[in-house]
Image: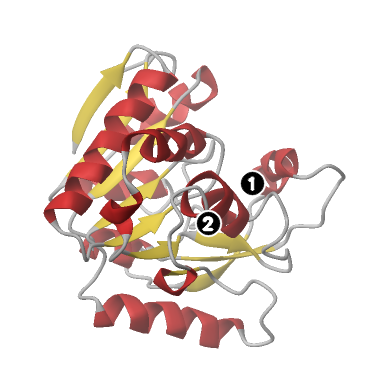
């Protein structure tokens, strides 16, 4: 796990965007698992700024997770955040990307669909994630096995509380559907990005503790090619 600190969110986003663009230019058919949340939005905008649409015309993109029961058109969905900030501006063909159907009547079948796609691709070439204030990765909450592939999760209280920021009114959130930590471990490159002082304590704990399921972010210590990129505020206690 290689840790690097940047002066501010913009410098982090520029570095991350250029890394992803370089990876795709080296392997045009790369499979990317992309996250939602506030932190990666600036990275996606920098990718749009620096890349050419042709750079991404052969990639496969998979969304990291979704809130169960929340439609893809919601501004709080992974689908909406990634599409609006990166996929549509780069004019990426919709046939090249997929997200969990959070409204599916068979969520286990959705998990198997994404699992099978990633198995067919030989795993992800890159996965990028943020970290929750309780250390969750994607919607893999504390207590989740590192051996899980895609699965439905019961959301922690803090995840439900923090998740309200993505919605204009109080929204019932109980479950998530998410890429599992086993897919992260099998990805060729894993990147965790975090900004802001509110992430500083959980990041210090992640670095101090041995890998354990009570702190999902510690899974990065088990990955052979993992990067943790932080701004100075997030790295405050490191």
| In the rendered image, the vertical position of residue 93 relative to residue 166, given as above or below | below
Decide if residue 3 is on the left or right side of residue 65: left
Decide if residue 218 is on the left or right side of residue 30: right
| Residue labelled with disc 2 | 139
Q: Residue at x 24, y 60 (%)?
A: 185
Quarter of the image for the N terminus: give it. Answer: top left
Confirm whether residue 208 shows in the render: no
Decide if residue 25 is on the left or right side of residue 236: left
Decide if residue 8 is on the left or right side of residue 209: right
Name the spot of residue 3 as percent of width and height, x first: 22, 28
| In the rendered image, the vertical position of residue 160 relative to residue 44, given as above or below | below
Mark 1 and mark 2 lie on one chain; the one further toward the N terminus is 2
Q: Residue at x 52, y 40 (%)?
A: 132
Name the spot of residue 189 as percent of width and height, x first: 20, 51
Identify the element where label 2 is drawn: loop
Q: Quadrant of residue 124?
A: bottom left
- Circle 1 Cα neighbour tier, 10 Å, few/some/many (<14 / 14–19 / ≥20): some
Q: Residue at x 72, y 38 (%)?
A: 165
Confirm whether residue 74 shows in the render: yes
| In the rendered image, the vertical position of residue 95 relative to residue 62, given as above or below | below
| In the rendered image, the vertical position of residue 33 relative to residue 227, given as above or below | below
Nearer to us in this view, 198 or 82: 82
| Residue labelled with disc 1 | 159
Label total for image: 2
Name the spot of residue 58 as percent of width and height, x first: 28, 66
Quarter of the image for the C terminus: give it. Answer: top left
- Circle 2 Cα neighbour tier, 10 Å, few/some/many (<14 / 14–19 / ≥20): many
Q: Quadrant of residue 93?
A: bottom left
Name the spot of residue 45 as percent of width and height, x first: 46, 36
Nearer to us in this view, 24 or 144: 24
Q: Are marks 1 and 2 in contact (CB under 8 Å)?
A: yes
């Amino acid at each position: 796990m290689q840790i690097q600190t940047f002066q501010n969110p913009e410098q982090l986003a520029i570095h991350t965007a250029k890394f992803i663009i370089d990876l795709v230019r080296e392997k045009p058919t790369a499979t990317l698992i992309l996250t939602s949340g506030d932190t990666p939005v600036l990275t996606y905008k920098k990718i749009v700024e620096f890349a050419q649409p042709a750079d991404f015309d052969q990639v496969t993109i998979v969304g990291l997770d979704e809130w169960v029961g929340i439609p893809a058109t919601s501004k709080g969905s992974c689908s909406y955040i990634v599409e609006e900030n990166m996929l549509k501006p780069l004019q990426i063909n919709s046939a090249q990307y997929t997200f969990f159907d959070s409204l599916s009547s068979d969520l286990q079948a959705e998990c198997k669909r994404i699992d099978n796609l990633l198995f067919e691709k030989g795993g992800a070439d890159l996965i990028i994630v943020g970290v929750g204030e309780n250390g969750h990765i994607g919607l893999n909450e504390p207590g989740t096995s590192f051996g899980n592939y895609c699965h439905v999760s019961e959301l922690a209280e803090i995840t439900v509380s923090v998740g309200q920021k993505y919605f204009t009114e109080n929204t019932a959130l109980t479950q998530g559907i998410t890429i599992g930590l086993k897919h992260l471990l099998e990805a060729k490159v894993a990147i965790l990005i975090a900004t802001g002082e509110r992430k500083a304590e959980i990041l210090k704990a992640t670095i101090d503790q041995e890998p354990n399921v009570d702190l999902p972010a510690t899974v990065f210590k088990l990955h052979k090619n993992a990067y943790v990129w932080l701004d100075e505020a997030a790295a405050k206690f490191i």
